[in-house]
Amino acid sequence: MLSSMKSYGQFCGLARAAEVLGERWSLIILRDLLVGPKRFNELRQGNPGIPSNLLTTRLRELEAAGILERGIDGRSVVYRLSDYGSDLGPVLIELGRWGSRRMIEAREGEIPTDSSLAAALLTSRTVAKVRAFKVEVAAGPAVAHAEVSEAGVNVAEGADPTAHLFINGPGLRGLLADGDAEAAVAAGTVSVDGDESLLTEFVRAFRAPVDDSVGNTPSQN
């Protein structure tokens, strides 16, 4: 399988990495597996734009490269990052941070997914030390949650009814960009339930700024 990949013909670590990671959908699959192990159908449903045959091909390629591995959960095959693949975690997080710097508003046809929202929480975790809490966030059809520790975070897709703080609304991207929770709530672009005092901790724990050269922060309308 590896021999079928396009070679750059260069004895270079970055070139070798690009041979595996540069294929369409590979990074998105790895993003989803960085959040947690997945069954084939979970990967397919979470990324409706990828054809089943292409997903099968990418999974085989990534497995052949030693980046992911298959396991059994009950009667289902589950895909997870290998130890080698897990080493990509910091790289994927930094790529997500880099990409979000030019993300002001969604382009036509773009929607958040549960995995992309969970990944956004993972990549936007700051180095700030905060008191521990659990938060659920929702944006459009996507829902994710995070368990925030003093200096880290664990994220997952979907709802968490045990969360201490619930944040919802189209202004979530703007909130992550500028951290102005008071303005977002006042404008009605973000709604908050649960322990509202934790909103201050949230904006300290999560930040995804936009480059000044791009323009203003995302519209919250």
Image: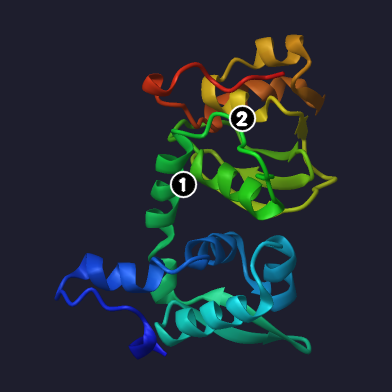
For the residue labelled by badge 2, is the local secondary structure a helix, a strand or a loop? helix
Kindly check if marks 2 and 1 are in contact, taking CB atoms under 8 A apart as contact: no
Q: Position of residue 103 (x, y in %)?
A: 51, 34
Residue shown at 69% from the left, 45% from the top: 111
Image point (44%, 68%), residue name: 86
Residue at the left extreme, as displayed: 11
Q: Is residue 188 above or below residue 71?
A: above
In depth, the one of 139 and 109 nearer the eye is: 109
- In the rendered structure, the answer to whether residue 77 lies left or right of residue 87 reads right
Q: Callout 1, which amino acid?
A: Gly
Q: Amino acid at mark 2?
A: Arg
In this rendering, is residue 125 above or below 55? above
In the image, residue 139 above or below residue 4 = above
Q: Nearer the viewer, residue 7 or 103?
A: 7
Q: Position of residue 178 (x, y in %)?
A: 53, 19
Label 2 crowd (10 A; few <14 / some 14-19 / many >=20):
many
From the image, tell me which residue sits under label 2: 173
- 105 sits to left or right of 127: right
Residue at which label 1 appears = 96
Which colour style is shown? rainbow
Dividing the picture into quadrants, the one containing residue 19 is bottom left
